Image (cartoon, rainbow, N blue to C red):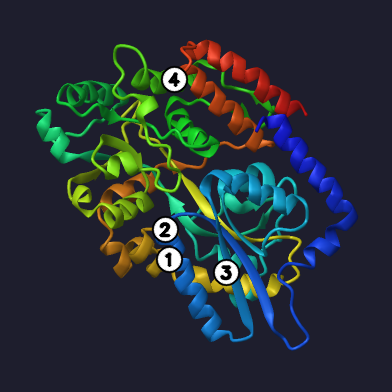
Amino acid sequence: MSTLTRRHLVGSIALLAVVSALAACGNNGAGTADGKVTLTFWSHTHPPMVELNKKLVAEYEKQHTNVKVQYETIPNDQFGTKMLTSLSNGSGPDIINMDDSALRGEYLPKKLLAPIDPEGFGAKSVDEIRAKYNEGTLDGASADGQLYGVPSEFNATAFVINTKHFKDAGLDPAKPPATWDDVTTYGKKLVAAGHEQAFSFNYLHSGWYTQQLQTLLNQTGGEIADPKTLKEAVTSPEAVKALQIWAKLATGPDKVHDPNASSRDATSPFSDLATGRQSMAVVYPWSMEQIRQSNPDTYKELQVVPLPQVDPAKPVNRWYAYYWAVNVASKQQPEAWKFISFMADNHERWIADVDFIQPVKGWETSAAAKELPALDVWAGAYANGAFDTVVPHYAEIQDAVTEMVNDAVFNGVAPEEAAKKAADQIQRSLDS
């Protein structure tokens, strides 16, 4: 779907909602005269998360016999569009689980979410809730001094190597790549040893494209757009450098994988790594648990190490988070926040069962965290991380970023030219 088409679709549906919003909202989260409450809750698909969501929903319903939670998962490649469209037309679920880029780029500017209700958390104020979390970690769901959600998962970025593949190539797993140039050097040796998908980014959907480019942008000092001036920034030398790093790993004489051979399964985004086809990858805490459950033999060969850097002397990592939040059109907001409070109170189970880290103060000293593999690597990644820079109309801009990367990786376009082409599309979105 083109970017303009996407916006026209959302805009058209939103216009219809002006006429019938209240009627539409009444179909969701409805209570009844006998006090029964039905909450609707949507998430993306991540099997370990879905399993724990179902367990917690069952436990909540058992504890609150007047509440029914209708939990629905949306395929990952449809999730962003379906969720945004539904909330834009005044319908959608009572409770959403959405990433910080989408919240800051679309949901909060469009006022699609309800401010957090401290009573639902048994708190006297929002500040009391804020005090439970590490500084800065709620910024992904904050706007204009208000808080709109709490994190279901808070991710830093690390790297993983297949130690068997390293030994096959005569590489020492105790000396993992420290820079992206090292990734190229090591990758060529891995390819020569028969591991042709030595390192690959994931070519899934616009969200994945953008977050991976942002990982590089954070290190080169680049941005997709300047949030203050609302001017495109992908043509800056720093941003082009990030795209060049990506393109070099996928094209030309130094390429260390075939992007056309990469798996495109968004439900299992690390399937190439999990099945032993891929030797190195950028990973998050949750991805390791998914691999452990799906491919335990390969998991034993993997080693989590710090993320390669452009400048190892000044390491920069990337944060991203998903938040539970409440649809502003929900008629069951108090009950929705109580359910979210229950989900958030189980933060040790989220670590133990899913490797989802929720950044409550002292999380790293909890019993569950002490069992988390590579805790020292993850703690280091959290210490020097930062959220992405997000600007309005972010869904459209993510589409432009995807096209830019595809031009540089698949279509033989020089990174500088690919960036110039994307810049026009990004600026049109920012100016609209």
* First reached walking from the N terminus: tag 2 or tag 3: 2
- Please give the residue where the numbered disc 1 appears in the rendered image: 51
| Amino acid bearing label 2 | Pro
User: Label 1's element?
Assistant: helix
Return the residue found at the far bottom.
Answer: 34
Rendered position, 340 above or below 171: below
N-terminal of the two: label 1 or label 3? 1
Q: Earlier in the sequence, mark 4 or mark 2?
A: 2
Residue 238 appears at what percent x and percent y? 48, 20
Q: Please, is residue 311 above or below residue 102 in the view?
A: above
- Compared with residue 158, is residue 42 higher up or lower down, i.e. above or below? below
Residue corresponding to mark 4: 409
Which label belongs to residue 340? 3
Q: CA distance from mark 3 to mark 4?
A: 41 Å
Element under label 3? helix
What distance separates the C-alpha of mark 4 from that of mark 2? 30 Å
Q: Are marks 1 and 2 in contact (CB under 8 Å)?
A: yes
**Which is more toward the observer, 213 or 121?**
213
The three-letter amino acid code for the residue at tag 1 is Glu
Residue type at numbered disc 3: Ile
Q: Residue at x 76, y 61 (%)?
A: 329
Q: Position of residue 83 (x, y in %)?
A: 65, 51
How many angstroms separate mark 1 from mark 2 (CA)? Answer: 6 Å
Mark whose residue sits in front, 3 or 4: 4
User: Disc 4 residue type?
Assistant: Val
